[in-house]
Each structure stands twice: as structure tokens, then as C-alpha cells.
Image (cartoon, rainbow, N blue to C red):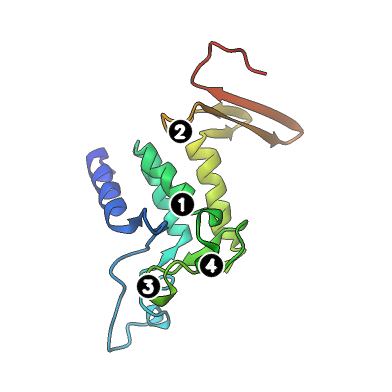
Amino acid sequence: ADATKADGAIENAIARLADFDRKIIKLFTPPFRSEGDPGYIAAYPPGVRENGGQYTHGAVWLAMAALLCGKIEEGTEMLLMLLPARHDPKVYRAEDFVLAADVAGEGQLAGRAGWSWYTGAAGWYRRAVLEVLLGITVKDGVLTVRPRVPDSWPGFSCVIKYGTAEYRIVARRDISEPAE
């Protein structure tokens, strides 16, 4: 897409869908309410799953888009707020070490996780962190590191196993000190 239009779209999506105080990213807002039968979406109460709650696949994709558009702080914060350990366990009511498929966006269930151990969202989260935030990719056997990390980060380190090779990556803003 045209860079200006993409930037505007991502900016508007963040403004309308990312609730940084409640640490959720809604699929859309406001929730759909209807007296008729709109179909599948009516299976969920307002604010739950696809009906105006956080659907974690979409939340990860918005964070990725923000990072790719240069909105590094917002993209990073959205990735961090998706982490279960960042939520009040009394409200979240799911494991604090696995990504949930959804988090309710409003009503008495607001902040409650659903469908934990949801591997699809976790897989996208892993890609968002490794490939987009940290910028680590392997294409045609060539390892590339092009991070998009916040200015407040002094750097990062990680270990990547690819085939039989193991890469120990240390990225730092201050290169005056030698790597360990």
C-alpha cells in the first residue's frame, strides 16, 4: 500500500483498537449488537472473541504492522501487553505462561482470557518477535539481523538454531564494549 495510507491506517487502528490501560487489542469496536441474526458473530456476547474482544491473531498482526511502519514504541508495547504475565491473574484466569486465543474486551468478562494454549497465535507471536521486532531472518541459508527495537533498549541477545548450526546473536547500541 501507499506508505502514507498504510501509516494512517495503522495509526487509526492503534488509536481505536489498542487499549493500553487494559492491555488488550480489540478486533473491532464497538461490539456488534443486533436483534436479528447476523450469523456466526452472534454466537459471542458483545466484547467476547470476534465480537469486539481481543482476537490474539489479529492483535499480533497489528503489532507487526506497527513495527513495519516504523511505529516501534507502539508495536513493542502491543507485543508486551499480549503477554499473559502482564495481566492480573485474578481477572485473566488463565495460565501466565501460554498465549490465549482471545481476551474479553468489555462487560463483566473484560480482561478474561479464553482458549489458552492456542498455538496459532503463539506461532504468529514468535514470528513477530523474532522476525519483525528483533529482525532475525534466514533466507536461502543467509542469516540477517535488522532489528526494529525501541530506542530505550540497550540491545538484546538470543540463540538461534538453524539446521545443525547455532547462532549466538548479541546486538547492542553501544559498540564501545566488546561482546562476551
Front of the two marks 4 and 2: 4
Q: Residue at x 60, y 25 (%)?
A: 170
Q: Which mark is residue 47?
A: 3
Callout 1 crowding tier (Cα within 10 Å): few <14, some 14–19, many ≥20: some
Return the disc, 3 or 2, that comes first in the chain's sequence. 3
| Crowd tier of the residue under label 2, counting other residues whose Cα lies within 10 Å: few below 14, some 14–19, many 20 or above | many
> Within 10 Å of the Cα at label 3, are there few (<14), some (14-19), or many (20+) other Cα atoms?
many
Q: Marks 3 and 1, how far apart in space?
A: 18 Å
Mark 1 and mark 2: Cα distance apart in space: 16 Å
Number of the front mark, 4 or 1:
4
- The quarter of the picture where the C terminus appears is top right
Q: How far apart are marks 4 and 1 (CA)?
A: 16 Å
The disc placed on residue 81 is 1
Q: What residue type is labelled 2?
A: Val
Label 3: which secondary element: loop
Q: Tell me which label, 3 or 1, sits earlier in the chain.
A: 3
Going by the image, does 129 lie left or right of 49? right
Residues at marks 3 and 2, CA–CA distance in whole angstroms: 31 Å
Which of the labelled discs sits on residue 149, or is there none? 2
Residues at marks 3 and 4, CA–CA distance in whole angstroms = 19 Å
- Labels 4 and 2: the sequence-earlier one: 4
First-in-chain label (1 vs 2): 1
The three-letter amino acid code for the residue at tag 4 is Lys
| Residue on which disc 4 sits | 90
Point out the tag, 3 or 4, that comes first from the N-terminus.
Answer: 3
Secondary structure found at label 1: helix
Please name whichever residue, 133 or 161, is drawn nearer the observer in this view of the structure: 133
